[in-house]
Image: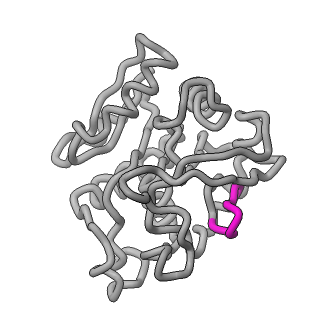
Amino acid sequence: MRIVLTSTNPAQHQNYVNWLRRLLPDIDIAFLLPGMNVDQTLDHAHVLLPGGGDPDPRLYGKPEARSLCEIDSARDELEFTVIRMAVERCLPILGICRGLQVVNVALGGTLLPDLPLAGYEDHHRLDGEDRMHDVEIAPASLLAGLTETTSGQVNSAHHQGVDLAAPRLHATARAHDGTIEALEWVQPADKPFLLLLHWHPERLPAGHPLSDRIGYGFLSAS
């Protein structure tokens, strides 16, 4: 088994590598960068779409919001290709923060380009530190099954959020203010593992129920 992380700056994504190797020390992890052969790199891989810059609002019909965003067009192009191929090949997918956002957009959903402007203040970093807030998890969800809980406290470091979930996705966790914290398949039967989170399990303490159990579930997915 090999884990592929999409990135335009691998130095910013070492926390993900450290987290996965803490859970499974001998795991093979590779970065997929723009310009690399996506077809070959994804062969029999698990896909992790990590945090980072904002998806271009033009991709979900809100070009007027571009000035509010830190856009990484190279990652947009790369990850749209990766998401399409991963779904076609039934590869397991874990999306974290930007990863949630870009999968939602790639599958036809939309985003709120700036949560504070939309009236949601408790999700972006404060003085350089992650926010902490509670989440409620849908009892019958993949997330609840992996974590064996329907509530908990998570870290938050994003200024964008889900507006409309993509037609094939639905919310399975929400924050106290109603914002979407996790997305999964509406109909998971005959589909690959897919879990999209707005929090950062790779930055939560070892043993946290909304971190390690998610990582183990992703690593053991088939």
Q: Position of residue 154 (x, y in %)?
A: 60, 46
The answer to whether residue 168 is above or below residue 31 is: below
Q: Quadrant of the N terminus?
A: top left
Q: Position of residue 55 (x, y in %)?
A: 35, 66
Q: Quadrant of the C terminus?
A: top right
Side of 105 relative to 212 (left or right) = left
| Magenta stretch holds residue 176 | yes
Side of 32 relative to 84 (left or right) = left
The answer to whether residue 143 is above or below residue 22 is: below
Q: Residue at x 42, y 56 (%)?
A: 98
Q: Residue at x 61, y 34 (%)?
A: 214
Residue range in magenta is 172-179
Q: Quadrant of residue 142?
A: top right
Q: Quadrant of residue 149?
A: top right
Q: Position of residue 116 (x, y in %)?
A: 48, 76
Tell which of 100 and 204 is nearer to you: 204
Q: Residue at x 68, y 53 (%)?
A: 134
Name, please, the residue furthest toward the front.
Answer: 127
Q: Residue at x 63, y 63 (%)?
A: 180
